[in-house]
Image: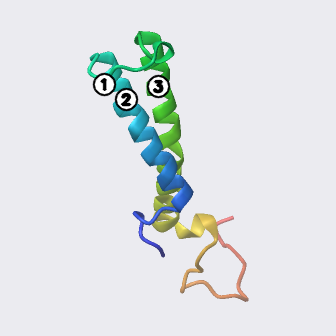
Amino acid sequence: MRALTQLPRPILILEALGGVILILALLTLHEMLPLPPPFTGKLAATIMIFAGIVLMLPAAVVMMWRTAKAMAPDLFNTRHSPDKKKGNTHDADH
């Protein structure tokens, strides 16, 4: 299994772009970075915050998916349990 930190390149780019947008929103709110008029103000900063979070969501989804597959491989049919036999499909509990 690949490590959780090894994300595909497009997802890493989206996450980095989301982080940059969040930093821009923070600097805009504190008036430390002068931006053009459409990007100044609280509304623009709020929109940038939501856009930054949305851009970071794919990386979180991929990491949660990989964690779930690692914790419960039987749910995703990725590995077979060693104690199950191929010929015996009878389940006595059901």
Q: Nearer the viewer, mark 2 or mark 3?
A: 2
What residue type is disc 1 on?
A: Leu
Which quadrant of the rendered structure holds the C terminus?
bottom right
Q: Nearer the viewer, residue 1 or 94?
A: 1
Q: CA distance from mark 2 to mark 3?
A: 8 Å
**Contact (Cβ within 8 Å) of mark 2 with mark 3:** yes
Would you identify the image quadrant in which residue 24 lies? Answer: top left
Q: Nearer the viewer, mark 3 or mark 1?
A: 1
Q: Position of residue 29 (x, y in %)?
A: 32, 17
Q: Secondary structure at mark 3?
A: helix
What residue type is disc 3 on?
A: Met
Provide the residue designation for mark 3. 48
Q: Position of residue 63 (x, y in %)?
A: 47, 56
The color scheme shown is rainbow
Q: Earlier in the sequence, mark 3 or mark 1?
A: 1
Q: CA distance from mark 1 to mark 2?
A: 5 Å
Q: Secondary structure at mark 2?
A: helix
Q: Secondary structure at mark 1?
A: helix
Q: CA distance from mark 3 to mark 1?
A: 11 Å
Q: Position of residue 53 (x, y in %)?
A: 46, 34
Provide the residue designation for mark 1. 27
**Contact (Cβ within 8 Å) of mark 1 with mark 2:** yes
Mark 3 closeness class: few <14, some 14–19, many ≥20 residues within 10 Å: many
Q: Nearer the viewer, residue 21 or 80?
A: 21
Provide the residue designation for mark 2. 24
Up/down of 21 relative to 39, above or below: below
What residue type is disc 2 on?
A: Leu
Kindly identify the residue that appears in the image at 47 percent across and 25 percent down: 48
Kindly identify the residue that appears in the image at 42 percent across and 70 percent down: 3
